[in-house]
Structures are given as C-alpha cells and as structure tokens.
Image (tube, rainbow, N blue to C red):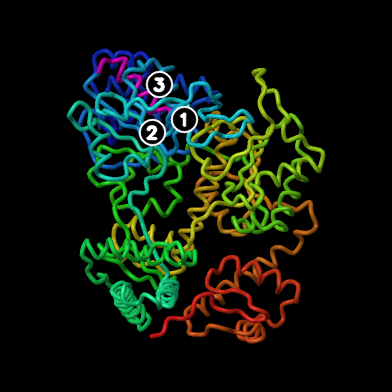
Amino acid sequence: MDYSGELNRQQRRKSAKVRSHLIKVGTSTEKLALTSLAILEQKMVDYGNVLSGDHRKALLEVVDLYSKIIFGETTGRSVIALDCGLGKTLSVVATLSAIHRLGYDSRSVLVCQSRVSELCLMVDALIQAGVPPEKIGLVHSYVYDPLSPVIDGEVQNLDGTLRQGYAAKPSNAKDDSSEFQFLLCSHQKLRGKKDLFTHTQYKGKARSLNIWDEGLISTEANSVSLRELNSAIVIYENDHLKDLTEVAPFIDWLKSSYSLLAAEEYSQSLGNKPKVINLPKLSIENLGSFEKLSQHRANGRRTEWRRDLRDLLDMSSESVRVSTAGGEVLQYSDAVSKELTNLVVLDASYTIRQLVRLDPTLKELSFFVHRHDLKSYEDVTLHRLNYYGSRDAAENPEKSFKVATEIALVIKEIPVDEAVCLFTFKHVDPKKPAHASGICSALSNHGIDPAATVTLKDGSIKPRFVFKTWGEHTGANNAAYCTHLFMAGVLRQREDKFAAQLIGQSHDLLTEMDSSALREAMISECAHVVYQASLRSRARMVSHGKALKANLYLVFDEPKIEDYLKSAMRGLQVKEWVPKDQFFTGTNVINDVAKKMILAFEDLTQGSTDLISGYEFKKGYGFSEVPTSTYKLSRDQALLSSAAWKLEGRSFKRVFPAVNQ
C-alpha cells in the first residue's frame, strides 16, 4: 500500500469484501495492516467513538506505516500527529494483536510510554486483545504488591491516595527483556546506550518496530546562570579561607572557566556571533577530587549555590555555549541515542510544540500533513481567567485562596449530575498545604461535596470530582466522562533550563535563540500541556469527526496561549472567564502593566546597575502615571516572573551582582 499516488487512494476505498480478500492473499504488509485496522476500528467503536470516512483512512495510514517498518519496507524516525482520542495508542494494541493472530512470531515491537501506570494498562489491553501474557514483557523499577487496590492502572493506598513507587503489575523482563516478542518499558529506560541495546533486541536481532508514545525529547540539556556562577565562586572562596591551599586548584579552575565564559558573553554584547567554548581540561583524578570539594560539608553552610559549581563540573567534558538572552551557559547531550531507528513517535501536540519540532531526526510523513483537521472542537469551549497561573502563585496563600474560591463559585452553578476534573500542582513542600486541598476546602465551604458521585448513562457510578496533578496530563483517561475540566494554573519550566533544552533539540549548539523566540517556544510548551490536559475530559471522545461537548476552565495570565490552542483544536470556542468574585476585576489592566515591568527588568538585567530606586524605575520606564494600587499589584506579579531582581525597601536590587568585566 503505497502512501502516494492514485492507486493508494483507490485502495483505501475498497469495500470490506476486498479488504477481507487482501487479508487472505495480499502481501505480509497488507495482511498485517488490514487485520490491524479491523481490530482497531472495532476497539474505537467499543469505546464509544463513531468513525468518519476520513478518520478510517487516517487509521489505515497509521497501521500501514507500522507494517511497512515491521517488514523492512521503510525505516528512520517518523512522527504521527493525529489528535488525542483518534486512536494512536489503540493502534499499537491492534497491531500487536494482529502480529500474534497472523503468526508473525519473528517480528517484535518495543513500546515506550511515559508512566508505569500506562504500561500496566497496556498489558491489560493486549491480553484482552488476545495476546498471550508470555509474549508480553514489562520493565520497571517499581514495587509490586498483589494485595494493593488498583484503579485505572494506579496503585492506591487504603485512604484512596496514590501509592507512590508501586506498580499494578510486576516487572517480568528485568533479567532478559530480549526474550519477549512485545516489550513495554518507560521512556526513562531508553535513556543511555546500555539500556538501549538491552531493550531493543529480540533474540539477538534488532526489534522490527519501536514506538514512542508522546513527544520525543531526544536530548538532555544543562544550564547555569553566569551571574549565579560568579556569585557562587565568590561565596565558595570566602567560605574556604581557612583551607585555601587545599581548594586552590579547584578555585583556579573555576575562575579560569568563568573568565572564558564572561569573555564570550562580552564578545557577543559587542555584536559578535556566539562560538563554542571548551572549558579547561580536567583529568579524571582532578574531576573526582573537585566533585568532592563541591559537595556540602558537614560543618559548612547548607547552600544551593554549590549546585552551580557541580553543574559547571558536569559540563567540563563537552563543549558549551553562552546565551546572552538570559546570561546562561548551555550544553546538551543525546538522551535517546540516534541509533534508535525504525521509530514511530505518537505525538498529538507535534503541530504546536516548538520544542519537539526542532528535532531534525524526526520527520512527519507527507500523507499526514493534511490530517490535522480530522477532529472538530466546535462543541468545546475554553474559558480563561486572566490571572496568575504559576506554581509560585499556587503556593501563595492569598492568591491560591482567591482562585480556589472562584473555581468553587463556578462549580456551584454546574448541574450536580455533571462530572468535573481538576488539575493542580503536585504537593512537593511538606511545609505548605497541598494545592488540591485548598480547592477541596473551597468546595466544602460553598456546600459542594468533593466526595460526591455521578451515575453515567451505562449505569456505572463514578466520582463526581477527579483530581489530577500536572504530570498526569498525558496517559490515563479515567476522567474521560467529565464534562468540565479546570486547570488552576499551568505547569511551566524554568526559562534557563528550557532555553538549553531548545538548543539541544536542534542538535546544534550554536542555534540562534533570542529572547522573543524563547518566549514563543515557552508559550507553545504551555499550550501543549493545556491541550493534553484538556483531552482528559469528554473532549477526548469523537463522534462523526466532532469532539464531544465539554467546558474547559483555565487560570493563566498569557492571552497568546489561546492562539496556539485554537491552532491545535480546530473550531475551539474561546470565551472570557467572567469572574464571579469581584476581586478579579481589573486583573487585565494589572497583567498589562506587569508585562511591561517584566520587559523593564529584562532591560535592567542587561545593564550594570545592581540597585535602582522605585522613583527612578517609575520615571525611567514610564510607570509614573500608573495608580498606586495597580502599580503595587503589577510589581508583585512581575517580580514573580523575574528571578534576577527583588524588592528591597522601596528599591529593586539585583539578586546576583552584575558581572565585572
């Protein structure tokens, strides 16, 4: 089945009778593709989907690609960017089932997913599809307790919370994964050449097909701020005045390295193009001793700045570059070896996610280019509250309380027989209350029972409220019955780390990356996260090419994210989230002023000033006419986004001193 030309299009329109004939007398590729399609179509219907003609054609193209790779008719790294809910992951189950049914025992497949719970669910799906358990290998490092309750692939504690570090199924392929025809493992297990060779072999031969479910980040990036590094060196030297002789070689290396990097930053400030920098060479002995010297001492101060010194040591063996966009030292290395070929990446966000699109090793096959409009979201509505949406805001008691109250007021008007999914930030600081607990409290305070249930059309009883944390925005679909989905903020990366990752994904250390391009890429990454989270709701399901009706509620202070989401979700309806709580009145004005202040802080960061009074700041950057209350709220919001400046009295002080040239 060729992907191009008139013959292929005619072939896709063949009747079920002709398909049945080809399954019997066609080539191995045709038999596998058409058998896989029959299984896949049935599974999609069983899950409540009603398939359109174009949807069926797209699914045939997916399984046909698998089949061509399995039988050696094509190779390389390809990406399939069909929308969430159109059957990408089910296509894997159908293809593995078809391989077994047709007796192609010499053909093997590796499937990589992001979470162990997803892998356990796939084991169940494969067994249900007729694949014998002895053919399925599962690799993970989690604990298996057969007595623990399991819900949707997740191991539960007795109180209903997730049991961290536990898997719903035992790892049966740790010792010899090459003996299993179908191997399931996490993305993390494919990072590094050792595990790559171990898991991509089947009985001494390379696996026929490798599938990577979700976006492929093929490089690992590292970064360190030049200014933070400069401060760390000064602090380290002052902290070791009593044993300078012992640490002198390490300090000399640090200063020599910093001088090279600072000189490169200065060169770029004069308009010169960036160049690759190699730090002073270190012997294995020196590297080992320097790493020990950079560690925390039992009688020393427990400080985070030592991490910057260790980061620089980690960079010493490979070339680095300096980025003036954020004053960062950047480096990358391959996380997933280029040797992993015969690879298909299933990534619904590929069309909008600039991070993965930078990877030159991936190609989107031409026949999929016009397949991004198979699903319409005209019955899905996004409501965006233009307010703080960061983790910092979620951990701020006042801001978090206001958002939780607003969410509760909106939910109070939702019919009690309609289910709700809510995304919150993970609880990482035991000294602070969990983000989700604040929303539960607000619900209870407004007469809403967080433990309520709903009865679905099929008679099943489900929790009315499904709480998820960021990190669960891909994979499990246990909230697909929820008509409403709330996102109380959005997961986002640190700017310096993300810049390094962008450059790494391009596989070119000298890729140009100005602050504007970095900002756009970061917004697209947030859009990817929101898009994936949104499709945990009923909007995941498709009927006659349309997503089922759903309402999405997003707390986020970046309007441009709407453009990316409308690009990914054709026909998406976007409405302003008109606040129930009057506290939010005027938020748009505050956000606009805050954005101008962020630009002002960025401008200050490029200069040599370490301290500027509030009066000078207002006058110099045009904030003199801004009302006092608006100025203060905007200032506080801008400082949350600026790691380089802090408020000291009525002035702004640079967090780390400017680099001395």
Residue 233 image offset from top left, x and y in percent: 40, 74
Q: Was residue 51 drawn as part of the magenta stretch in this picture?
A: no
Q: Which residue is mark 1?
A: 167
Residue 356 image offset from top left, x and y in percent: 38, 51
Mark 2 near mark 1, Cβ–Cβ under 8 Å?
Answer: yes
Q: Which residue is mark 2?
A: 140
Residue 393 image offset from top left, x and y in percent: 64, 58
Q: Which residue is rendered at x = 49% and y = 56% of the image?
A: 493
Q: Is residue 94 above or below residue 528?
A: above
* Magenta portion: prevailing SS class: helix
* Residues in magenta, as a range: 90-104
Q: In this orientation, which residue lies closer to the viewer: 75 or 163?
A: 163
Helix, strand, or loop for circle 2?
Answer: loop
Check the picture and name the quadrant holding the N terminus.
top left
* Nearer-N-terminus badge (3/1): 3
Residue 56 image offset from top left, x and y in percent: 42, 27
Check the picture and name the quadrant holding the C terminus.
bottom left
* Nearer-N-terminus badge (2/3): 3
Q: Which residue is mark 3?
A: 126
Between marks 2 and 3 in the image, the one whose residue lies nearer the viewer: 2
Q: Which residue is rendered at x = 44% and y = 31% of the image?
A: 143
The amino acid pointed to by label 2 is: His
Residue 405 visible from this viewpoint: yes
Mark 3 crowd level (few <14, some 14–19, many ≥20, 10 Å Cα): many
Q: Quadrant of residue 59?
A: top left
The amino acid pointed to by label 3 is: Leu
Residue furthest toward the left? 204
CA gap, disc 2 and disc 3 = 18 Å
